[in-house]
Amino acid sequence: MYIVIVGGGKVGYYLSKALLDEGHEIVTLEKDARRKEFICNDLGSVGIRGDGCEATTLAEVGTNRADMLIAVTGDDEDNLVACQLAKYKFNVPHTIARINNPQNEAILRSWALMTLSAAPMSSWNT
């Protein structure tokens, strides 16, 4: 399966590592040059410096052939934009957006996006 990961922070790095270990073909988009270099040094040439919210960047990494895009940046809005572009411009069948602020879950789900939250549900009403 070809998977585009947007965000190479801790979540993106460990997700990339796990998916590679399972034999998937991946690319990890990361804005920060030093973080991208860390990913490449540790995981191979899967790290690409770029903005997953830009259609040109997504086109360059072959998002049109991706089976899935997973956006795991620290910014809910960026995760939403990346998933919207993947789903509606590149026809990616499966998109997952990380939710950092549980109050944003409704808007992400209203776009028919699968969501993932690290926050325990008991803290969602705070």
Image: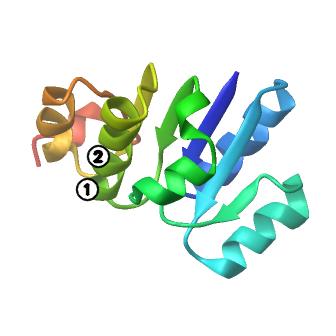
Q: Residues within 10 Å of mark 2 (few under 14, many from 20)?
A: many
- Which of 42 and 61 lies nearest the eye of the viewer? 61
- Which of 95 and 89 lies nearest the eye of the viewer? 89
- How many marks overall? 2
Residue 28 placement, left or right of 86: right
Q: Is residue 110 placed above or below 45 in the rendered structure? A: above
Residue that label 1 marks: 77
Q: Confirm or deny contact between disc 1 and disc 2 (CB under 8 A).
A: yes
Task: State the mark number for residue 80.
Answer: 2
Residue drawn at point x = 50 percent, y = 38 percent: 70
Residue drawn at point x = 45 percent, y = 19 percent: 93
Q: Is residue 12 placed above or below 83 in the rendered structure? A: below
The quadrant in which the N terminus is found is top right
Residue 28 placement, left or right of 123: right
Amino acid type, label 1: Glu
Query: Residue 3's x, y, as percent?
Result: 63, 33
Residue drawn at point x = 33 percent, y = 57 percent: 78
Q: Is residue 64 placed above or below 10 in the rendered structure? A: above
Residue drawn at point x = 85 percent, y = 56 percent: 45
Query: Residue 24's x, y, as percent?
Result: 77, 27
Amino acid type, label 2: Leu
- Which of 126 and 84 lies nearest the eye of the viewer? 84
Q: How is the image coloured?
A: rainbow
Residue lying at the far bottom in this picture: please name it.
34
Residue 101 placement, left or right of 43: left
Residue 110 placement, left or right of 76: left
